[in-house]
Amino acid sequence: MKKLLSTLLFSFIISFSLFANVENTFQQANELYSNGEYTQAIELYDSLINSNVSSANIYYNIGNSYFKLDDIPNAILYFEKAKKIEPNNLDIIYNIELANTRIADKIEQVPQFFLKTIYLTTLNSLTEKQWTTVNISLFIIFLIFIVLFYTRSNNRKLWLSFSIVFIILTFTSGIIGFQSYKQKTTHNTAIIFTPTIDIKSAPDTKSNTIFILHQGTKISLLEKTAQWQKVRIASGSEGWLKTNNIIEI
């Protein structure tokens, strides 16, 4: 028993020490940013990411640092990384829009089908952790109604009806939470980092150039070969480019 308590205490001390170190590094990076030392700030923020510590705030601050250095492609890349974690953060959305005014490509987005808009609005209304909390809460309520169904002889149909409703809500919230997790962890978008790139009709340098893109433009990733990536832009146009011209979000 003493050995177990000692192990738990040691783990707590280590965890607290690591948390304090992360907070200290983050504050140091923020101070460097405030003092205009953007390159040094990025190095400290990157050290946190390399230590498997990441958050919307870290990505957002890296994006701001790159923006101050006039490195717009990297600024957009990190703003987009922050948005994947907090899709409804108005500061992140504003900075993405601001950074996009500094790139060459002005692509008009194809209007989304209204059901997809509703789905994405619902998906992004809560974070992944919040959806997990909702899912667990709904499942607990479902269990309460199941207990009432088996222990109370009166209103059994009512308890059964509520049980069905809440198991459906639990299942639905679970699916949405999983999709929120996938959205956060799946790399299906990227930023172009080559100043000017020809988008080809096929994965072949000899194929026709169908349009041209510039650095900083966000693209969706489709099919992939060893050296080529099929992409789609916001207008719906598709084509192929070499994979070494992009960095995944």
Image (cartoon, grey):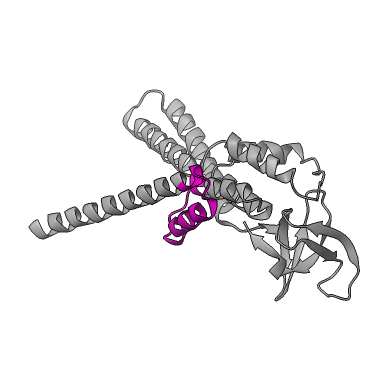
**In x, y percent, where is residue 66?**
60, 51
Frontmost residue, 79 versus 238: 79
Q: In this image, 151 relative to 46: left or right? A: left
- At 60% from the left and 40% from the top, the residue drawn is 92
Q: Is residue 33 magenta?
A: yes
Read off the magenta span.
32-58
Vertical comparison of 85 with 231: above or below = above
Task: Using the image, determine if residue 232 lies above or below residue 158.
Answer: below
Residue 118 in view of the camera: yes
Residue 235: % across, % down: 82, 48
Residue 125 located left or right of residue 239? left
Tell which of 83 and 237 is nearer to you: 83
Q: Nearer the viewer, residue 222 or 29?
A: 29
Q: Residue extending furthest left?
A: 2
- Taking the spot 57% from the left edge, 49% from the top edge, the residue there is 65
Residue 111: quarter of image: top right
User: Viewer-proximal residue, 6 or 156?
Assistant: 6
Q: Quadrant of the N terminus?
A: bottom left
Judge left or right: residue 216 versus residue 17: right
